Amino acid sequence: MQTPAAHGLPRRRRPSALVLALVTPVLLTLAACQAAPQDPAADAPPAAEDAAAPAEQDREVVIYASVDQQFAEPVLKDFEADTGIVVKAMYDVEAAKTTGLVNRLIAEKDAPLADVWWSGEFAQTVDLAAKSILAAYASPNADRIPAGYKDAGGLWTGFGGRARVLLANTDLVTAEQMPKGLADLTGSTFEGERIGIAYPLFGTSATHAAALYAARGPEAGKAFFQGLKDKGLQVVDGNGVVRDMVVAGQLAFGLTDTDDACGALAKGAPVKIVIPDQDGDGTLVVPNTVALVAGGPNPESGKALLDHLLSEAVERRLVEAGWIQLGLSGGLADTTCGLPGDVKGMDVTLEQVAAQIEPAKAELAEIFVR
Amino acid sequence: MAAAGKAQRRSPGRPPAWRSVPLPLLLGVAAYLWLVHAPLLGLAWETGRSLVQHPELLAQALPTERRLPLLGRSLALSLGAALAAGGIALLAAPRFWRRHPARLARWRWLVLGLAPVPAYVHALAWLPVRSALEARLGPDWATPLAWLGSGWVLTMAFLPLALLVTLVALESVPRPLTDAAAVLDDDDQAYRRVLVPLAAPLLLVGLALIFLLGLLDYSVPTLYQLNVYAMEVFVAFSQGNEAARAVLVALPLLLVGALLTLTLGRRAARIAAAAGARVRPAARPLRWGRLLGALQLLAAAVVLLQAAVPLYTLTRLAGTGGQAMEALRAGGADLAYSLAVAALAGGLALPPALAAALWLQGACAGWSSRGRWMLAVLPLGLPPALVGIGLIAVYNQPPLRLHGTDAMPVLAAMARFLPLQALLVYGQLQRLDPALIDAARVYQGSPLAGWLRIRLPLLLPGLAGAAALGFALALGELGATLVVTPAGRGTLTLRIYNYLHYGASDAVAALCLAMVALALLAGAAAGLLLGRGGWQPGEAEA
């Protein structure tokens, strides 16, 4: 038998390597601690006059936002600077089909960690209200919001909005071929593979599908989507993909949201935005929704943040940033991408739409997930 | 070879060398099982509660006329991708192998660099190729191209992992057996008939893990217009927002994982036991014939291509807009947080991974190998978002109220990747020279000193590799991290997916490049830990 030394063990090197392996995570942890969010209260000016004054111990607020981080973050930082209240935010991502934070809220129901819920649409919010996860709060800034865009019991409030639009590549689609409504998704002279939609199972596409079910009736709604399937439309992973494929010329036109469409236009892509069915049923306007989480740890700060998010200034700022393109009051609209202030919406209530989400998804999965 | 195998199999089993530390081992195994199974336990509890209230949900677990073909397609796609990745890795690995004199071998740990890059980024990088082919071949080729495109991208995305597993598997083979075979025949035959079959247990388990990871990915197939079962799970998840529904729909994936690990785990344990009696190896580099050598070079070129294409695309995109630098600046805190989470997940996993590896090797009496392997890797079939929901169910109530703390993303990464790390350490254990362990027993001052001075250093390559792998995979984790990361914190991957949504391709590219650089650093650090060229038991004598 040979001793370890006979095998040539490099004794001096290995302990240092082990030490390195043990010390590195500790150093990295310390680095992360250094990078932890700073308390803006330390640097912030005195609290602004217009903000509600939360209790002294209630100096932070936790928000779950199913809204793109790059749009939400500046708005929340403004709130921090104005009030000195630390905002701890968590953002959802489309890759998780924006189901992550909703399900997190549900999982946390018995011991909530969030104070405020901000969604880029309304169906999930209505569902959360039905599951008793939201608390009522009638923000004074919600007075200007039309009754159709807020819960009668104050569980949630809508603001701003995106609309469902058709985006066409002007290098491929002539003025005569330009689509005018959803009927052109099946009636166009273009082959199905040159037209795209996102899976009508997630996000605003699912909400739009539910709205069509609500407006036309379940049978007509299902028949419409079966028609899209039969024509062989490209069904892609998200509205952003529809936009990218139209911009790249892989699609002649497709159905997407105004934020995606206006983004493409702002980048100088050869595209045209068509608001569908303005002479007919109208298009779906999808408002953002905000709500107070029941049993959240910082209710007063949560209310102050809700007031901030529902202010006209924030709505205008989000229009300028490109997250929303329409205001729910006062004819506010993103004119830079040619949207009128009086987009004709579909004649359905948000509750009617939300009620169709689950049955529509069940049927559309049968059609599209094969 | 067969005779040698039988002879090995007939020889009485070597008593486990680790009996001197039963309590730490048991504690380590218990920690492993808890860390890996906590999400499943949480989900089982939540699902049970939901089923009591809504028993009709149970129907979700039944396969339907539509779901069965979907499941079949998913199985075929992920199996094809796993086999392709495994095949390419098997051919390419010798060129990156320490026993090969080629210079590539020095850089083998850098294969980790591309491991955390989201499969979606690979898909975007290869999408123009698919479009060009479709334009040339016509619409009749749309479906075959969807299959080929999805399969190819998944293969590229999992190739780094496959290569890593293959390298570890090859190095787990006792050299005397290959050297003996090389005496009787040429090196090509020795590789094909001895080395690969002996490495097969680990290779198969590694491929099974990649297959399971592939089953959970829907982003690539849907981008190529191909529906898969993972999409169905997400449909269930978003439909009514009930985790129980998603768990029940995901049951076939869990069952597939269970069956697979049951079969392969048993086989792996049997063959590993047969190859158990090892002696110190002699060494000479293997030399390949023309055909095998050419195939190896071709496969190595594919490995380099899978790295080059996304890196080229990312570099080109990062330079096209003004948002790249801004994204890097804004992502500084997320970068630091990702680093900390990944380092802690990769590092803290080592003790339980080591314990699990010893357990898989048979260090605890009273467990069947079938049961061990199934318990060890079963949760790999769980979709990441459900891992997060399960963790909340466990850790958001007394006495384990950890939800909302920085421990959660670390626990999530460990729950997802500990089995892979345990596998790597298991591979390292398989190649330990028992003579050294026996020598340690004789010369050690105390069991602790023996562990610290002999056994741990001998295991260092596997531990370093496992830590680096855990680090790299945790860096790219998304689904579970999203659900459990404390508010106010964010990881680089979360930020990347946020940017992906609104088409900021330059920002996405810059952040992805930062992540690749971090993973490359992890790979380089692993390489440094092991030493360039690496120390191997017995090599000094060769």
Image (cartoon, coloured by chain):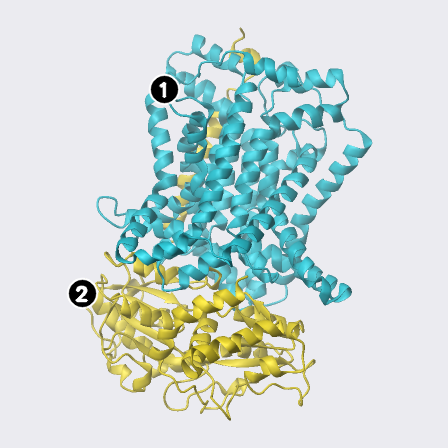
- Pick the residue in front: B539 or B16: B16
Taking the image as shown, residue A323 lies to the left or right of residue B146, namely left
Residue farthest toward the bottom in the current orientation of the protein: A279
What chain does mark 1 sit on? B
Taking the image as shown, residue B531 lies to the left or right of residue A105, namely right
Residue farthest toward the right in the current orientation of the protein: B290
Which residue is located at x 22 percent, y 75 percent? A137
Above/below status of B243 relative to A366: above
Give the class, few, some or many, for how many residues have Cα within 10 Å of label 1's Cα (few <14, many ≥20).
few
Callout in the foreground (1, 2): 1
Instruction: Tell me the quadrant of the picture where the C terminus of chain B can be found.
Output: top right
Taking the image as shown, residue A264 lies to the left or right of residue B182, namely left
Residue farthest toward the top in the current orientation of the protein: A1
The residue tagged 2 is A56
Q: Which chain is cyan?
A: B
Tell me the amino acid under the disc marked 2.
Glu
The residue tagged 1 is B21
What chain does mark 2 sit on? A
Asked where in the image residue B511 lies, by quadrant, the reply is: bottom right
Q: Which chain is yellow?
A: A
Q: Secondary structure at mark 1?
A: loop
Tell me the amino acid under the disc marked 1.
Val
Dots 1, 2 in contact, CB < 8 A: no
